[in-house]
Image: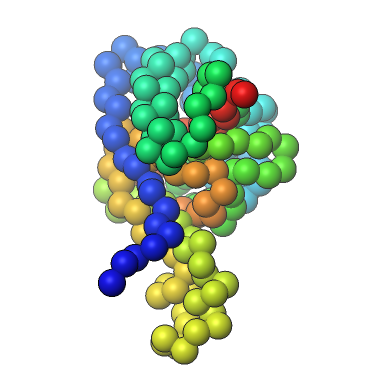
Amino acid sequence: MHNLFSTPVDCVTIIPTAEQFNKTDAFLTRIFDDSQENNWALETGKSTGQHGLDIHDCPEMFWLIDQALVHVREYWNALGYRKPLDIIPDSSWANVHKHLQLTGEHAHCGGFKKSHISTVYYFKKPDNSGHIEFVDPLEYIHRMTPVHEFSERVGTYNEFKTNQFDFVLFPSWLKHRTQVNNSTEDRVAISINFIGLF
């Protein structure tokens, strides 16, 4: 038995220094304080995306971008993508989810920006704050098979468990969403898209 056509999703841990964490936290908090809930894309919480998609250009984010690029290059090679002249961050934003807030289903390879590799960094992730879920790329095929009575939970979404400071990498075409934050503390996730230059 061979399980063909798998979709590699990777996860590494990037731990900031106390100074890096505090500077980034203050930076994001300033933007969140100037944002509205349920005002950006499929967010029920607040997003810096409301103000732009370029937080990777801000000095408070350089420590994360520098470390992320090392893992993005390794992941690029693992996917078998052809060698680019360079790989750069193309767009980035952060979301904060309070109790019972979430992000709806979406992908990152269309719309305003096109990217090749998408990532999410869990800057703050308290216990019981929910995980990311990826949509099975063959979901529409499974709906046409008699394997079982199809249900959303069984056939569509695959939970990918994460902890604070986890950095998740996946192909930008892979649809995903977040689970509800059932914690009373904030969950803060930083999304960064990367594109290869040819």
Q: Where is residue 137 in the image (x, y as percent from the top left)?
A: 51, 62
Quadrant in which the N terminus appears: bottom left
Front residue of this view, candidates 90 and 130? 90
Q: Position of residue 167 (x, y in %)?
A: 36, 35
Q: Where is residue 147 in the image (x, y as percent from the top left)?
A: 42, 86
Splitting the image into 4 quarters, where does residue 32 fall? top right
- Give the residue furthest to the right: 112
Q: Locate residue 155 relative to residue 43 in the image: left or right.
A: left
Q: Which residue is drawn at 60% across and 23% down?
A: 197
Count of labels in the image: 0
Q: Which residue is drawn at 36% across and 59% down?
A: 159
Q: Locate residue 26 relative to residue 108 in the image: left or right.
A: left
Q: Is residue 4 above or below residue 87?
A: below
Front residue of this view, candidates 158 and 26? 158
Q: Residue at x 47, y 80 (%)?
A: 151
Splitting the image into 4 quarters, where does residue 2 fall? bottom left
Q: Locate residue 70 relative to residue 39 in the image: left or right.
A: left
Q: Is residue 193 above or below residue 45?
A: above
